[in-house]
Image (spheres, rainbow, N blue to C red):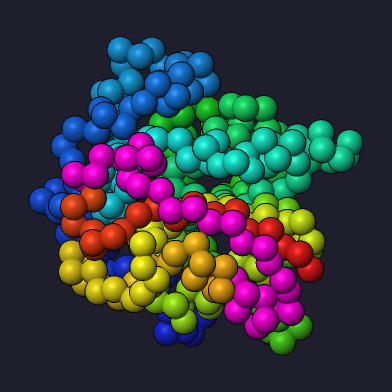
Amino acid sequence: MSSEKTSTFSEPSYAKSDKAKTDYPWYSPNIDKYLVPETQKLLEEYSNIPRDKQSEHVHEVRDQAWAIRSYPCTGLGVWLVPFISTLPAYPTILERLKGTSNGGSGARLIDIGCFLGSDLRRLAFDGAPTENLYGIDIVSHWDVGFALYRDQDKFKAHFIEGDMLSINEDPDAGSGETTPLQALCGTADIVSISAVLHQWDWEDQIKAAKKVAALTKGPDDLVVGYQIGNVEAKQIWNKALQLHHWRHTPESFAKFWDQVGAETGTAWKTEGKLLSFEEMGWDPEDNRWMELGDKALNFVVTRLK
């Protein structure tokens, strides 16, 4: 699906160039250290892959994903470390998806930049019905995800290959054409978006976050995820990626969502926390190509109106 005319790029140039090369600072030949006990248990009990076969399996899958896009998370293997289940809001997310928090039907979760669908599989493993799970990505790794988790017969989540920037925040002003991605507007109870917003500067992050807001239904909806932040709120020039990025602190991220709310007629409560790479379960040596002061910013943003 093509993007609307916009200055904001959706795919960084580094991810599409020289995909066969492995001499990037964000590529590790061996990613066994990220095959942590939680993931070993998931692969063993959910995917029926014996532990002595898992290393070979995840390396084969990583090579398949790397051939599609040379993303840092792909090359380093950090996608093997669970994320969504570490959020303080995870029990609430699970309750809503199962419908146990209100005695009704389960909530809908949309994962933007879903990649292999690892967070969605964790939700499935913990009992969330997969019919109300949606994954969106600008390029499909969906079949590679099925190869990783071996669950094509039971995983019923929906996947849409599309550019989130193509979402029209004001459908009444559009041409009337409704794409599968556009049809999700105003339907999400929970939006998960990790390792996406940080690729842009402040202005373009605002543009993207307004698209995220357009997916939500109303009060009490959640936007959760992580991105690379910094101990100082500032725009940086990432020398390795040759791109400008805005790095948030929890305070600047709250102001950021205040601006999103002001421009969309909504309101948001933002909870963010900076975590070291070690606290995320990542090897700091694998992130030496990042900028001084960079950390992971985990967030839960709640829609108030």
54 shown above or below 273: above
* Foreground pick, 258 / 26: 258
> What x and y, as percent, mark residue 264?
69, 79
Q: Which residues are magenta?
A: 257-286
| Quarter of the figure with residue 156 | top right
Q: Residue at x 25, y 40 (%)?
A: 283
* Foreground pick, 122 / 261: 261
Residue 259 sits inside the magenta stretch: yes
Asked whether, in this view, residue 131 is left or right of residue 153, the answer is: right
Asked whether, in this view, residue 249 is left or right of residue 282, the answer is: right
Residue 47 visible, this orientation = no
Asked whether, in this view, residue 230 is left or right of residue 289, the answer is: right
Q: Quadrant of the C terminus?
A: bottom right
Residue 302 visible, this orientation = yes
Q: Residue at x 61, y 66 (%)?
A: 212
Q: Residue furthest left?
A: 23
186 shown above or below 7: above
> What x and y, as percent, mark residue 69?
30, 54
Asked whether, in this view, residue 77 is left or right of residue 93, the answer is: left
Residue 73 sits inside the magenta stretch: no
